[in-house]
Image (spheres, rainbow, N blue to C red):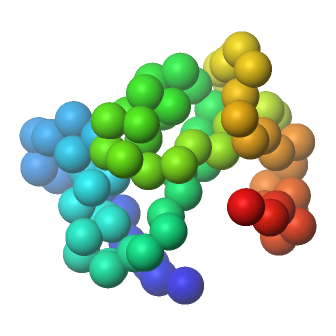
Amino acid sequence: MFQDFECFGNDGLPKDKNIRLIVERNNLQNPVYVGDTIWDKESSEKAGVDFIYAAYGFGKIENPKVQIQNFEDLITLEF
């Protein structure tokens, strides 16, 4: 586990660049991004990070590859 974050307000970079920064800073080998909007999905794809759709969130994504119905679902996911 790790604890880190980044946002546009800190560095002026778009979400995909900030995702890459977190991956690189923490030497993450198989990262995933959990999000609930199409912008989250597109940003994670641009960053080269797998995406998990949080269906309980605000956005709608058609035919997500992986989705969760609540945060606890992350514990049981297998890739």
Where on the picture, by quarter, is residue 8? Answer: top left
Q: Is residue 16 above or below residue 61?
A: below
Total marks shown come to: 0
How far across and how far down the image is residue 41, in percent? 51, 31
**The furthest residue to the bottom:** 1
- Observer-nearest of 63 and 55: 63
Quadrant assignment, res 78:
bottom right
Which of the image's four quarters has the N terminus? bottom right
* Residue 79 horizontal side relative to residue 45, left or right: right
Q: Viewed as shown, does residue 35 lie left or right of 61?
A: left
Residue 38 image position (x, y, % from top left):
53, 21
Examine the rendered structure and indicate whether residue 13 appears above or below residue 19.
above
Residue at the image point whose x is 57% and y is 43% from the top: 51
Q: Position of residue 5 (x, y in %)?
A: 36, 63
Q: Residue at x 74, y 41 (%)?
A: 66
Quick check: can you spot residue 57? Answer: no
**Residue displayed at 25% across by 70% down:** 24
Q: Residue at x 40, y 75 (%)?
A: 28
Question: Dividing the image into 4 quarters, which one contains the C terminus?
Answer: bottom right
Residue 59 appears anywhere in the view: yes
